[in-house]
Amino acid sequence: MEERLVDIRDASAMETLFDELAMAAWELLRRRDKPTSAAEVARVTHLEFALAQRKLDLLHQHGLAEVLPAKAKRPTPTYRATCKRIGIVLRANDKEDYALWDSYGVRIREAADKLARKQLSLEDSTEAERPRAFYVMPLQLSANEMKELRHRLDELTAFLRMLQERHSGERGADDFACNYRFEMQLQPLAEPVLPQPVVVMRLIDREPSCGLERVDPMTRLSQRERQVAQAIVRGRSRSETADELSLRPGTIATLTKRIYRKLGISNRLELARCFSQPGTASDATLPI
């Protein structure tokens, strides 16, 4: 399963998503992508074994992790993430769901404030070995300049996501701690912080009796438009896409505008979100 959907009305599951230790354990399982024992999770996350076990049991309870029985090569039970991404599902135009999201939004901001308190002071973070960069000044922007700024920020965010995935897996397994946060500045943290997963919000039109589902947005595109969209999500440039599909770069630009218009989006990251929805008719996926 690529993505696990959590109903925003499921209070117990939502509380699990706000459990920093449980989410750190899930992120470790996701990055390793192989059976991992509770003892190993405890060692890497620096948690007591009993506490790590409780968090793994909580993940299993909500379908975010599976338990693999002990074998000859694995003398104790191990755990593995059941999905690569987590999504919170809201029903479109549902006042109750939006009210819940607003309340959870307050907690998200509180968590961000808590993380901000862990960063180094300005004086400490400007030492030569601890660079701190920030940019604050008033600007006058035209509509086109604002569009260009958003495009460049999207590219920067995509680059940071790439770095996040580069450090997944076995690399740095014994150093499982975040040391930077991103908010248009790069600033060292004063103490180690356990990594947290990226959780996205999903909208559905309704809740059928068979479970949660969404219409595949890719069905709105022609076959050629879908090919171009896949190339965009994979990071291909306009000229590379043109060569790959035997088209002119100008045609790729026209098709790209048409794709964005049909899907109601404006940039590459929003397109990647469309491809990351479960049931999407594409093999190209990118996390939010």
Image (spheres, rainbow, N blue to C red):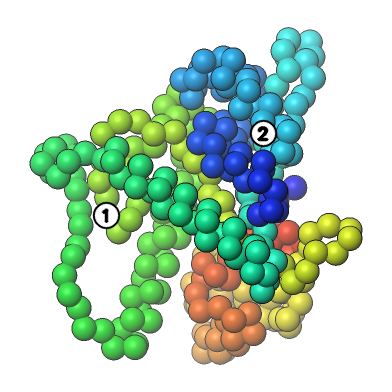
Q: How many marks?
A: 2
Does residue 84 appear anywhere in the picture? no
**Where does label 2 land, which residue?**
59
Residue at 36%, 71% (x, y): give it.
152
* Depth check, front residue: 72 or 29: 29
Q: Position of residue 67 (x, y in %)?
A: 75, 26
Q: Is residue 20 above or below residue 220?
A: above
Callout 1 secondary element: loop
Please rate how many residues cluster around mark 2, counting C-alpha atoms within 10 Å: few if below 14, some from 14 to 19, many from 20: many
Q: Position of residue 258 (x, y in %)?
A: 60, 87
Please rate how many residues cluster around mark 1, counting C-alpha atoms within 10 Å: few if below 14, some from 14 to 19, many from 20: few
Residue at 50%, 36% (x, y): give it.
20
User: Which numbered disc covers residue 185?
Assistant: 1
* Depth check, front residue: 118 or 110: 110
Does residue 225 appear anywhere in the picture? yes
User: How many angstroms separate mark 1 from mark 2 (CA)?
Assistant: 33 Å
| For residue 100, side relative to residue 69 (left or right) | left
Callout 2 secondary element: helix
Q: Position of residue 108 (x, y in %)?
A: 46, 51
Amino acid tagged 1: Gln
* Depth check, front residue: 167 or 125: 125
Q: Is residue 119 above or below residue 104?
A: above
Residue at 52%, 61% (x, y): give it.
102
* Depth check, front residue: 150 or 49: 49
Q: Earlier in the sequence, mark 1 or mark 2?
A: 2
Amino acid tagged 2: Leu
Residue at 75%, 47% (x, y): give it.
1
